[in-house]
Image: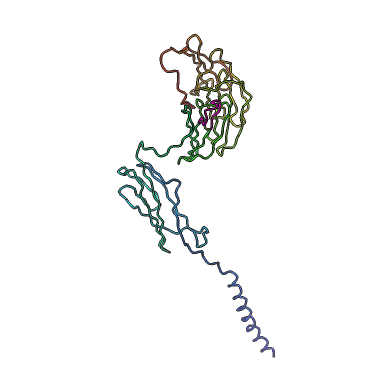
Amino acid sequence: MSQRFVCGLPLMACVVASIGGGCLDDAVKPPPVPRVARIEILAPDSEVLIGHTLQLGIQAFDSGGGNVSAPSVTWESGDPGFITVDSTGLVTATLYSLAGTFPVYATAAQPRLVDTFWVRVHLWGEVKWRVPLGVAPVLGGPAQGPDGTLYVLGEVDTVSFLAATLFAVTPQGHVKWQQRLAKVDGTNYPIVGSDGVVYVVGQYVWAFNSDGSLRWSLTARPNDIPDFHAAALSADGVLFAAMGYDLLALHAGLGDTVWVGPRAPDAGWLLPPHRLHQMERGIALRLRRRHRSAPLGCRRPRYHTAGANFVWQRPRGVRGRLGSPHGLLVDDS
């Protein structure tokens, strides 16, 4: 009797193990892999300058339009004499290329899927795009942000030239956003910090984040014309603003006043202020101001950026240019 019982134990154990094992296999069975139904070539731009490159990539979709893992593809140029493409999808417009549009093909072997991307090649000096930004000529800007966005001021109406519009334009020529600024005109210009914040100094001061949201503004200012007001931005986050008769150092992140310089005694500061090289006594700020007695001459006073301490000034002769409203020189070396 005991022999039959003992012999029955392994038989029952085998049956239970077999059943349990079958259930375990069903529980961990992996889901089916989505089938790639379509591939698409991706690129940050569709245009490239002769002698330059453009990186292409691949995105894949299933039959329902959902994203799936992209398969390996083979790249091929439709006209290798003008554009080439390597195994990673890097397109190069050869130096022998002509202006025009050329195809690039991506082929996935399993399943056999093909997509075509058209690349527009531009020659040097050719107009890539044009964006109308107002009814009056623009003297100030453009300035470029860290992400390639261009910032430029435009005067979009003829009713009031004491307001201008700040445009943010993509490298492809599309307007991302625009903001109308009071007490600013086309003689002012934007400057951009390393963090992407864009500043405009007119009679008012405006600071915008790269998405177009207002960071801060300084609007408690005398009612004056903003012609040729300008600023310089230091590497340590100080915005030096020359506005008419006033010279201000502002905290670039918050808009708080760091110090107020001496008021110009005659016709006001000329732009632009310039950051000078590092000195033993600190970094100096150079400004130029106009004299009623000599309209074509100017003096160039210098101030330490750590405070409104006057360093020295020297007269400048009446010959030569007084400076351009288009430029800004910052030198921290």
Residues drawn in magenta = 153-165
> Eyeballing the image, is 21 above or below 124?
below
Name the residue: 50% across, 61% down: 62
Is 122 left, or right, of 303 in this rendering? left
Q: Residue furthest right?
A: 1
Asked if the magenta segment contains residue 30, the reply would be no
Q: Main secondary structure of the magenta part?
A: loop
Name the residue: 59% across, 37% down: 213
Please name whichever residue, 152 or 41, is drawn nearer the observer in this view of the structure: 152
Q: What x and y, as percent, mark residue 34?
A: 51, 64
Q: Quadrant of residue 181?
A: top right
Q: What x and y, as percent, mark residue 234?
A: 53, 28
Asked if the magenta segment contains residue 163, the reply would be yes
Q: Quadrant of the N terminus?
A: bottom right
Q: Residue furthest bottom?
A: 1
Q: What x and y, as percent, mark residue 7?
A: 64, 86
